[in-house]
Amino acid sequence: MKRQSAKLSDAGIWVGVNFWSRAGGPLMWRSYEPEIVSAELAVMREHGMTVTRSFFYWPDFMPAPDALDEELVSRYADFLDRHQELGMRTIPTFIVGHMSGQNWDPAWRQGRDLFGDVWFVARQAWYVRELTARFKDHPAVAAWLLTNEIPIYGDWRSRGIGTLDHEQVTSWAQILIDAVRAGGGTQPVSVGDGAWGVEVTGADNGFRVRELAGLVDFLGPHVYRMETDPVRQHLGAAFVCELLDLGGKPVIMEEFGLTSDYAGEEHAAHYYRQVLHNTLLAGATGWLAWNNTDYDDLWRQEPYSHHPFEMHFGLVDAAGRPKAQAREVRDFARVLDRVDLARCSRPDAEAALVVSSYLESRYPFTQPGDATIVFDVCRQAYVAAREADLAVGVARERDGVPGDCRLYLLPSAKQLTAPGWRALLERARAGATVYASYFAGEHTNQRGSWWPDLDGMFGVRKRSRYGLVEPIHGDRLTLTMTADLGDLKAGDELVFPVAGTANSRSYLPVEPDGAQVLARDAEGRPALLRHTVGDGWMVLATYPLEYMAAITPHANPEDTWRLYRALAAQAGVEPAVSFDTPLVSAALMRHEDGRVFVWCVSQSDADIKAAPVVRGGSLRNADGSPVSVVELPPYGVSVLELA
């Protein structure tokens, strides 16, 4: 299965930052201080950052429906010149009516609808076209962005969920992109919406990624997740990038970062390191951190007066001192140069993580929670697969289940369509291993697995009762292997957290009817079964393993990674490099010239040593010296070469 690592062919690899000067923040253009701007850019350049994302603060740049503020336009031209002097480029962002916890309207808007009012959309298009025409030929312009997080600007209370019409939104985007082209802009263009569409989150905010992907040149996720588990936190943005493998468009981490008010500097550096490297391994090919500097002197100015934590997202503090986060970006940029990322790509995957179409398709008479839970369980499965060193491709049921994988993982799936199940059964008959874990759902509406002919597919007889669930007791689930599976041997134990609602904290009682029991629970009930189908296997877990881990704080690592590793071995999927600990994961990138680079990423909060298992080769450092043990600091990353 192909995994994308598409790049903007003429734009290079972007490593940079979202930029507001500490002299003014969003109001910087009113009192533009060019020498401070140059000093700020120089610090970014010294730390490997060659691209900024910059902003036309809309109320200032467009004071009237048919006018630009020419003084501000000239100041922006100077801003571009200062980028060019340092060998840097920038991405202008047009409609900046939302920023850092506040919305601002042009004075003349007068409540007009952002997307549906024809006159108002026309004025936006005029504004975009005119600014593009002014700067289209400047060598410092790398690309264009229509907006900043406009779903929040469109309706900040709902963030657009359930209130913005996708047809209006897509038409509005088409009109504004056409305005860029009409203004002579030939550089790449995207929306700047944050990529929070239903295809990623399960909640429809009107900005549907599939529809916009046909219009834009890249997709730009904005990721600021709050989690209850360090590993989920470190891999959360990576999984979002995997989900954005839509339309073959490059994925640029358009915004990510943290405020120093929420984290100590050492831990902030850990977070930056993890997000940068893990999103690279998930297919991202550009990074723009939020943001360049702190704003301590702007404490009286909105939005910082009422959102004071927004003052401290900077890679550099208000006195110009680079933080540890800036050094992480610098070190990351050096790694990209060393491996020549522009000519690298991810190897194909032999294992597929199947994402139910219920994430994004609004089937009749289903609940909103049926969609959003798909994200949670699939992300947890992605975590377990990474812990098992498996290169997994994200296979969306809506796009059809690919036929070129040996292992298919369907985690805690209440719902899949009948054609989706038929496709998975055909993959098993053709020789693949298909794994699925039971999940009744969190609510009572049609509670239970919507699996057609579960008994026949998995070689069991259901012992469930209509309208009732079989509750899981206790806080831990222990499964004992009763037969060998991959590297798991009879007698081995797997331990999982138990969690959920009165509905979801439940298992599926079955009896084997042609299936082999691979593991039983503490009461001796079948918990993992394998059924021969054609040339392959259908494997059933009767417990919602991924779901329970997904909603459990500090669950990872838990033993699903061991199960996935065993399933992969059973299916003939063997990673070229792996570790026997889930605290260190391995992932590969291939260069056009045949070199293979191995990322070793630690999820340990302490120093760790781990011996890699290398199949068909050996590992070496950048200087050519052999590596038999990988030594990593807390949450560290080492990039080696596979010889």
Image: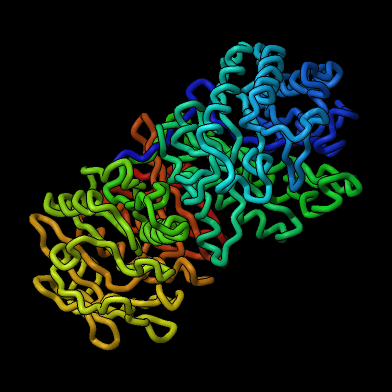
- Which residue is depicted at the point 71% across and 42% down? 291
Establish if 639 lies above or below 387. Answer: above
The quadrant the N terminus occupies is: top left
Frontmost residue, 463 versus 244: 463
State the residue lying farthest toward the bottom: 523
Frontmost residue, 459 versus 118: 118
Establish if 78 lies above or below 312. Answer: above
Q: Position of residue 453 (x, y in %)?
A: 17, 63
Q: Where is residue 605 in the image (x, y as percent from the top left)?
A: 57, 66
Frontmost residue, 622 versus 145: 145
Establish if 573 lies above or below 538. Answer: above
Q: Position of residue 396 (x, y in %)?
A: 34, 46
The quadrant the C terminus occupies is: top left
- Which residue is depicted at the point 54% across and 56% down? 234
Side (left or right) of 527 relative to 304: left
Q: In the rendered image, which quarter is residue 63 located in?
A: top right
Residue 198 visible somewhere in the drawing: yes
Frontmost residue, 418 versus 424: 418
- Which residue is depicted at the point 80% across and 36% down? 26
Q: In the rendered image, which quarter is residue 28 located in?
A: top right
